[in-house]
Image (spheres, rainbow, N blue to C red):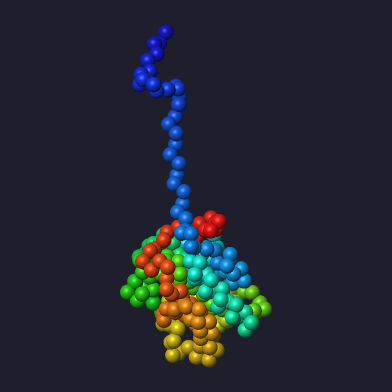
């Protein structure tokens, strides 16, 4: 009969044959600070069309860190946006957000995409007149984003009672600076370009933007500036609430309801 090798056990220790060391539990995902909120908890009437949870964006893929299509902001920014919405609704308009808080991992995803010069699947729609190798130098992509601080958002306005547009392959999407009926369908008012259009026509005060397009940009900007938001001159859709609560902090918790649940 084969002899068994004796088990050596330290004094006071218990050992069961076949026992396996307990598995280490994965660390829970980071959560937002207590003063971050879901916009819908402050104003559910503001439309949310969160583009980075979909493939309808300049990358052409869902972006890292966007687990759910939920707008998250600092509470002061969300409350200011609510005040702007209250003034726009009687005028027949509603705000619509495309992006709000953006985790650092999403910004990192943008950087990796921009460095891959072979990936130009969305060029004809979002940056047809810009060489991809110029995206960093021209300021369209950077390694940090104000969105990660929680008080910046991308926003437009929609006319109330206008028919909702369906996003998708119903027709080929023309260049983002084309006439509104040639661009990807969007129920936003005509701003002269689509959202995330990497082109000088996206500059808020570009002199080539006139008529109803200029008037629409001014409606959006005046409504938000009256509540403390400052527009980024290069992007008609980009606004930051001032003063920021976290001017020097770039967060990386995921965009998900549980990141702000119970807060």
Task: Give coordinates of residue 245: x percent, y percent.
Answer: 42, 68
In this view, the residue in front, 244 or 158, is: 244
Identify the residue at image location x=48%, y=88%.
209
Q: Residue furthest left?
A: 137
Task: Give coordinates of residue 254: x percent, y percent.
Answer: 47, 58
User: Picture quarter containing residue 39?
Assistant: bottom right
User: In this view of the protein, can residue 23 be seen by the observer?
Assistant: yes
In this view, the residue in front, 92 or 170, is: 92
User: In this view of the protein, can residue 128 be seen by the observer?
Assistant: no
Task: Give coordinates of residue 94: x percent, y percent.
Answer: 60, 77
In this view, the residue in front, 236 or 247, is: 247
Q: Is residue 94 above or below residue 259?
A: below
Query: In the drawing, does residue 20 fall left or right of residue 38?
Result: left
Q: Residue furthest top?
A: 1
Q: Is residue 118 above or below residue 224?
A: above
Quarter of the image with the N terminus in it: top left
Query: In the drawing, does residue 159 fall left or right of residue 51?
Result: right
Q: Is residue 215 above or below residue 85?
A: below
Identify the residue at image location x=44%, y=36%.
23
Identify the residue at image location x=55%, y=83%.
190
- Give the mark count: 0
User: Picture quarter containing residue 142?
Assistant: bottom left
Task: Give coordinates of residue 175: x percent, y percent.
Answer: 49, 78
Identify the residue at image location x=53%, y=58%.
263
């Amino acid at each position: 009969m084969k002899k068994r090798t004796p088990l050596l056990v330290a004094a006071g220790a218990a050992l069961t044959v076949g026992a396996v060391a307990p598995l280490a539990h994965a660390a829970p995902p980071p959560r937002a600070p207590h003063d971050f909120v879901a916009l819908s908890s402050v104003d559910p009437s503001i439309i949310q069309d969160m583009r980075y949870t979909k493939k309808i964006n300049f990358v052409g893929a869902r972006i890292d860190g966007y687990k759910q299509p939920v707008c998250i902001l600092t509470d002061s920014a969300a409350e200011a946006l609510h005040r702007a919405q209250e003034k726009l609704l009687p005028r027949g308009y509603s705000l619509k957000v495309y992006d709000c808080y953006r985790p650092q991992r999403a910004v990192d995803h943008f950087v990796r995409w921009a460095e891959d010069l072979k990936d130009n699947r969305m060029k004809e729609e979002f940056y047809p007149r810009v060489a991809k190798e110029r995206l960093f130098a021209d300021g369209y992509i950077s390694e940090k984003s104000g969105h990660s601080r929680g008080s910046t958002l991308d926003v437009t306005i929609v006319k109330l009672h206008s028919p909702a547009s369906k996003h998708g392959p119903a027709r080929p999407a023309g260049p983002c600076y084309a006439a509104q009926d040639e661009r990807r369908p969007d129920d936003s008012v005509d701003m002269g370009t689509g959202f995330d259009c990497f082109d000088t026509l996206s500059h808020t005060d570009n002199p080539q933007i006139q008529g109803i397009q200029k008037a629409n940009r001014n409606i959006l900007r005046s409504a938000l500036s009256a509540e403390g938001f400052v527009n980024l001159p290069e992007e008609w859709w980009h606004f930051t609430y001032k003063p920021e609560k976290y001017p020097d902090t770039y967060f990386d918790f995921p965009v998900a309801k549980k990141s702000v649940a119970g807060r």
